[in-house]
Every structure is written in C-alpha cells, then in structure tokens.
Amino acid sequence: MANGVLSDRQMTAMIASGQITSETTITDGQIQPASLDLRLGSTAYRVRASFLAGKGNTVADRLKLFEMHKIDLTQGAVLEKGCVYVVPLQEGLALPKGMTGAASAKSSIGRLDLLTRVITDNGVEFDRVPDGYQGPLYVEICPRSFSVVARQGQMLNQIIFRVGKTIITDDALKALHAETPIVSGDAVISDGLGFSVDLMPETGNLVGYRAKPHTGVIDLDNLAHYDPAEYWEEIRTTDGRIILDPGAFYILVSREAITIPPNCAAEMAPYLAMVGEFRVHYAGFFDPGFGHSTEGTGSRGVLEVRCHEAPFVLEHGQVVGRLVYEHMSEVPAQLYGIDIKSNYQGQGLKLSKHFKAP
C-alpha cells in the first residue's frame, strides 16, 4: 500500500478485513472519497467536563469518574447548549502497524458550532487515532451555540486513515499549483496554502452570519427546515471590515476559491494565534475533487470563526487560515461533487443544510 491518505476502495477493504469494525453493517453511504462517516451509538453520557483518557486509561474508566447521567438516543434526545456529552460510536478499529487515523466534524456539524471530537482509549489528543490502535471509538459533543436533538445512527464525525508521510511539502505544492491551479489568484504557500476572508463580495453587502444567543432547538435530522432569521443575524458591511465580538460565533467565507485535485486531500489547520483574537473553527477535511468539477472555478471555503477575549477588527483579505494538502494513497473511485451527492460543491457563503435557503 502506497503512503498517503486512504481512498474509498481501501477503506472498503479495511471493512472487509475487520480493520474497521461495527455493531451494525457499515453502509455504502458512510464511505466518502477519502473519509468514513461515523455513527452515534444508542447512549449519551452527560459528563462534568471534557476529558482525554490518557495513557493507561480507557474511556469507560473515565466515564465512571465523570458521568452524571445517561441519555437514551434511540428515540432522539436534546443535547443542551453548554453541556458536555460522550457517546460511544458504532464503529471501532483494529488498525495495522503503520496506520493512523484523524477525525473531524462533518461540514454541517461544524457550521452549527457543535463541538464534536473523537476520543480513544489511552488517548492523549482529540481527533487523533494513534498508530496501530485497536479498540472502541467515542465522540465528545458540546453544543456551543444551539441545543440540538441527536439520535442513534446520526453521523456527526468523519475519520480519515493515513499510511506513512502524507503531507505535501511547500515546494511540491507550488509545483502542483503551477501544473493544476489549486486556488484562484496568487497562491500564498507557507506550511500549506493560506487563505483569507472575503468582506467585499462582488454583489451586495452580506458577508456573514452571527449566531443568535437565545434560539430554539435544532433537530439534526431536519434538513432545509429552519428559518435562518430565527437563528442567525446577518452581518453586512460596505467598508471591507467587521468587528468580531468576544464569545460570538460567525459563519464567513474565504476570498479564494479552492480546488482539491483527485490525487490529493486537505485538512484545514488553525492559524497562528498571533494574528489576532480569534480562531477559525475546526472545519476539518476536504475530500479529493472538492472544487475540481466546477468548470475550473473552484469552491470557496466556509469559515467557522470564534472571537476570543477582546473585540477584534477583521479586514477584507486578511489571512485567517491554511489548508494542509496531503497525498492520496490512490485516486478514489468516486470524487467529491462528481460521483457522489455533495452539499457544498461550488459553494459560496452558506449555512448548514439544516436551514432553508435565504
């Protein structure tokens, strides 16, 4: 097996060989071009605080210390804003030596400001599965802007698998961009591809959305269902700048259109804290083919931004994050937006799929 991020075909082989296990049959719909969607189990544990298992400990051991009460997810249950829950996932792993995993919230979940992070037995990092891990998977869920209704079987997280060194060096990324442009305009390449925020749209003055502080519950099964005005405040500007409020959550969009070629995947990495009092949220993975089939125009990256301690002025074109490109072990059988139904291909500024189109 060649070094790189594993493809849909390779993950299918892992399922067949028992390297990916599950209480119930894994469906074809869970297998994305370079990632596997993970399903919630039947029980959520309300816990006192977020935790990692740590070396020598299982998550089950930690739950005995921190559990407050159990919640049955089989018929759906409310997970309340500001609370922390741990849910055993239906999938488990028996990875071979030399293979690691990395997890992330799915796009729609990140856009709801729903903090979801995978944890493992003996784990010392969130969303990272160590080399050769064998054991169960759990997800920590902390709704930050909206309370949600969650159910057994829902897919809030995804996982990729890596063999060997996968990151594309800056020199190789520059060569790739020269051969097949990966971004509109000039490529800012330094430890990945830098991208900036768009606060001067070509039409109109709507540049983003800010989550309202007191809203109703969002049922994660309801798609194109909710009125955006009940949950989001529109952010408009005519001078190319906005002021971020401490503690507030924003949906913004990148100025650049991005392309992920079929032989690559990418992960959005948080930008250095030194650039300001904010961070781009854990936006996760970009599958092979993202932006690739949009007639050469690419797709914008939606930015999930939270301001920290002090109000902060964000300017049009300010660099706010970077994409780390990775080699695929092989080109997937299916590509994002071409062979599978993809909600965000060719996107601009866009809320999660739970909301009606404005």
Image (spheres, helix red, strand yellow):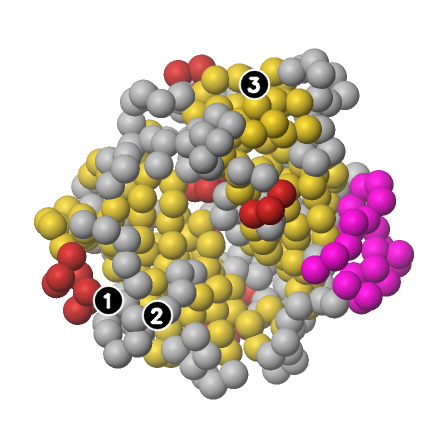
Q: Is residue 27 above or below residue 169?
A: above
> Which element is circle 2 on?
loop
Q: Amino acid at mark 3?
A: Ile
Question: Which residue is at a point 88% across and 58% down the rendered structure image?
Answer: 179
Q: Amino acid at mark 2?
A: Gly
Residue 123 - label? 2
Question: Which residue is at a point 52% across and 24% down the rendered structure image?
Answer: 209
Check disc 3: other Cα within 10 Å, few if <14, some if 14-19, many if 20+. some
Question: Which residue is at a point 66% across and 50% down the rendered structure image?
Answer: 322
- Quadrant in which the N terminus appears: bottom right
- What percent of the width, then of the height, locates residue 195? 70, 43
Residue 235 - label? 3
Of mark 2 and mark 1, the one earlier in the sequence is: 1
* Label 1 sits on residue: 59
Extreme residue toward the bottom, this view: 97
Check disc 2: other Cα within 10 Å, few if <14, some if 14-19, many if 20+. many
Q: Are marks 2 and 1 in contact (CB under 8 Å)?
A: yes
**Magenta residues (range):** 170-191
Rounded to the nearest whole Å, what is the CA distance between mark 2 and mark 1? 9 Å
Q: Amino acid at mark 1?
A: Val
- What percent of the width, then of the height, locates residue 113? 42, 37
Of mark 3 and mark 2, the one earlier in the sequence is: 2
- What percent of the width, then of the height, locates residue 224? 45, 26
